[in-house]
Image (tube, rainbow, N blue to C red):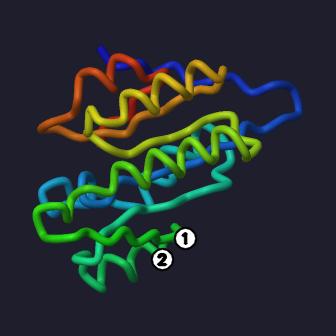
Amino acid sequence: MEKIVKPKKKAGEQLTVALFVDGPNMLRKEFSVDLRELKKRVSNYGRIIIAKVFLNQFAPEKLIEAIINEGFESSMVLAQNEEDAMDVDVSVAVAAMEALLTKDVDIIALASRDADYLPVVQKVKEHGKKIVVIGAEPGFSSSIRNAADYIEML
């Protein structure tokens, strides 16, 4: 069952959101993810102050251009070989933890289907912040889906 109750804002205050996208996991042709729609859905939770998409060096130039045109920051992660090309997980996790601990954010939004992010989801909650996980089927991890405060399906 999906959680659809949105967080409540304090009087006169807008919540802040840091959005991190696992590009190799989510920005695939089979999912047809619309970055504008993704940003719009996440903005329902608060004002987006960080919006980063993590990619590897094998990302097509047109994808990088689309990411920048939608107002996201593109972060390139180098893979040793093509087998590691999908692995941006550590960089995404570090960026999410940095935002959690050093930025004034109320909500971390993570677009990924990957169970590897379960420790990030748990730490966000442990620090008293909310976590939105944006996923897609097939392959959306039940562990991060069940641990998240809010879920958005694309």
Residue 152 numbered tag:
none
The residue carrying mark 1 is: 71
Q: Name the residue furthest right.
A: 12
Q: How far apart are marks 1 and 2 (CA)?
A: 5 Å
Circle 2 SS class: helix
User: Along the horizontal axis of the image, is 38 left or right of 154?
Assistant: right
Residue 64 placement (x, y as % from top left)? 37, 78
Q: Name the residue furthest front.
A: 80
Residue at the image position 21 percent from the left and 59 percent from the top = 86
Q: In this view, does 84 lie above or below 124?
A: below
Residue 91 quadrant: bottom left
Residue 79 placement (x, y as % from top left)? 25, 69
The residue carrying mark 2 is: 68
Q: What residue type is labelled 2?
A: Ile
Residue at the image position 15 percent from the left and 71 percent from the top = 81
Residue at the image position 64 percent from the left and 46 percent from the top = 99
Q: Nearer the viewer, residue 103 or 80?
A: 80
Q: Which quadrant does the N terminus fall into?
A: top left
Residue at the image position 34 percent from the left and 67 percent from the top = 55
User: Along the horizontal axis of the image, is 84 left or right of 46?
Assistant: left
Label 1 neighbour load within 10 Å: few <14, some 14-19, many 20+: few
Circle 1 SS class: loop
The answer to the question of whether label 1 and label 2 lie on touching residues, with beta carbons closer than 8 A, is: yes
Tally the numbered discs.
2
Q: Name the residue furthest top.
A: 1
Q: Which amino acid does label 1 sit on?
A: Gly
Q: Which quadrant does the C terminus fall into?
A: top left
Residue 7 quadrant: top right
Q: Nearer the viewer, residue 82 or 113?
A: 82
